[in-house]
Amino acid sequence: MHNGLPPAFIFIVGGLLIPLFKGKVRAAYALLLPVLGFLNLLNLPMGASWVVPFLDFQVTLCRVDRLSLLFGYIYHLISLITIIYILHVKRSVEYVAGFLYAGAALGAVFAGDLFTFFCFWELLTVGSVLLIWARGTAAAQAAGIRYFLVHAVGGLVLLAGIVMRVHDTGSLAFDFIGLDGSVANLCIFLGIGINCAWPVLHAWLVDAYPQATVGGVVFLSAFTTKTAVYALARAYPGTECLIWIGAAMAAFPIFYAVIENDLRRVLAYSLINQVGFMVVGIGIGTQLAINGATAHAFNDILFKGLLFMSMGAVLHRTGKINATDLGGLYKSMPWTAAFCIVGAASISAFPLFSGFVSKSMVMEAAADHHMTVVWLVLLFASAGVFHHAGIKIPFFAFYSHDAGHEVEEAPLNMLIAMGITAALCIGIGSFPKYLYSILPYDVPYEPYTLSHVMSQTELLFFSALAFTLLLLSGIYPAEIRAVNVDTDWFYRKGARLFYRLCAWGFNGANAAGERLVVGGIAGSLARFAKQGPANLLWLVVAPCLVVTGHDAAARAQAKTRLYADLEAGTLAIGFTALAIAVYAGILFLG
């Protein structure tokens, strides 16, 4: 007997049934699914359940512990919030893709073996690509194809690692793996890293996420990278190289985000920046660091989702998302502006906001292990995220110059979704003990110490001062109408060049072959085959006409009639058979 269903099943099966409903019934049904899923989650027993035989192995469809439960809670919560956010959407594709995507993420975090994990991991790609393509633009189509190809490669690398690991160990267990020098474990590590948007492997995120639908990008910001963070916390805690990978992730996006014009791309870079903090915590590997990484994943899903929702509301009302095209919207969209500021304060780790109570856990874990360089990088990243997400997003979207947009406030369902998320950001920041109580480890931590509050406030104050002085002096990078090319240059430019070279080489060879074979040899054979029997038959008939006294004009007329009759197939069967026999005889005797 089982006390509940695997969480993924309710979302996936329920989501596939959404097209059967319309209007208010569909809205009520879509809102009910996350609620039913959460009630089912509360009823699941700790440990492994739904263990079924597969070939010579046992696969575990549901494994519940404190780590998977934390991600299960936030995945259900953000799914409900996002469904509220997109209730005005009429097409079913976003609902189906969203639930398929969320269900795949739930399946991955509750998977108790590598095979189950891989199946749901690949299903993540299907759901997320549909959310990108659902926007219906040429740019979204191209970005979705690139996104799919990148994740297909990552999935193949992961599968290769799983196959080799099962061959080496004879086990499908999805627990600690670590890097021990084996190729199998390295492949699994890299396969997860692609979805985690590690440096150099990250361009798929900033390329594709801004092209998704207004609601789709909220789903996207929640699941793929956070599921990868979960997988690293499960399989590779304490892996030292993750510390440096995470530090690079936290630092480098700042430079791109500062000069980026598309505000949803700014948030995509900011997403990588925040995941960097999580990866550092997993690399440190202590209980405090793992708690910090997972708590920050929980909070990031909320405040990053809130920022994407506010920018989505702006895009929905104005049709614009570039900083150069926006400004002055606080007059017509005051609630959206206020919610955006809450998200900005949360991601910037203001006291009493959610980022303050989780980001500091990772930094303290680094300080406890005397990782001075890493701590300084994270400090720089904290100041940088305040520049590009804490100030730049709300400033250029809602304040700055007045772009003259006379629009209505965001739809009510969008405001409700943003209001719930903003309340959670403030609630968690003000009362963190409730979040701390569901973290993987029972480790005491007090974020509201005098030194921490003062140091963070000073950091934010001087960051704001630096932004103001740079902006007033004209040194701050101007917003320009351009696309900043990252490592996606290799497929934006290099892949196009490769395509052109292939088109020139292969299509040129194909054209030459067609001229030689089809137009030349085959054409000649066809013409010969068409005229050959007539020529052979004329060789027999012409002497007979000469002997019988036909003049040149009569022979020419007879020849024309003979060729015409033979081509039209109107000669008597005997003459045709004679022509074929003569022709065949010449071929064989020759």
Image (cartoon, rainbow, N blue to C red):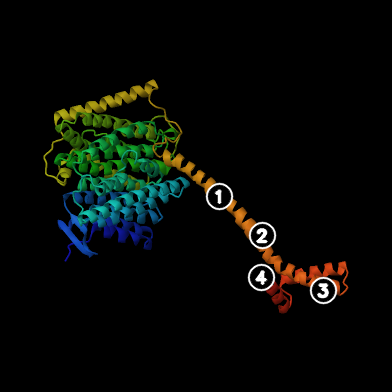
Mark nearer the viewer, 4 or 1: 4
Q: Which secondary structure, mark 3? A: helix
Q: Residue at x 46, y 39 (%)?
A: 493
Q: Nearer the viewer, residue 517 or 251?
A: 517
Q: Nearer the viewer, residue 312 or 106?
A: 106
Along the polypeptide, which appears first: circle 4 or circle 3? 3
Q: Which residue is mark 1?
A: 509
Image disc number at residue 55: none
Alpha-carbon distance for marks 1 and 2? 21 Å
Q: Which residue is mark 3?
A: 544
Mark nearer the viewer, 4 or 3: 4
Mark nearer the viewer, 2 or 3: 3
Q: Residue at x 42, y 49 (%)?
A: 145
Q: Pointers 4 and 3 in contact (CB under 8 A)? A: no
Instruction: Give the residue type that dot 4 points to.
Output: Leu
Picture coordinates of residue 37 (x, y %)? 24, 57
| 454 over 524 or under it: above or below | above
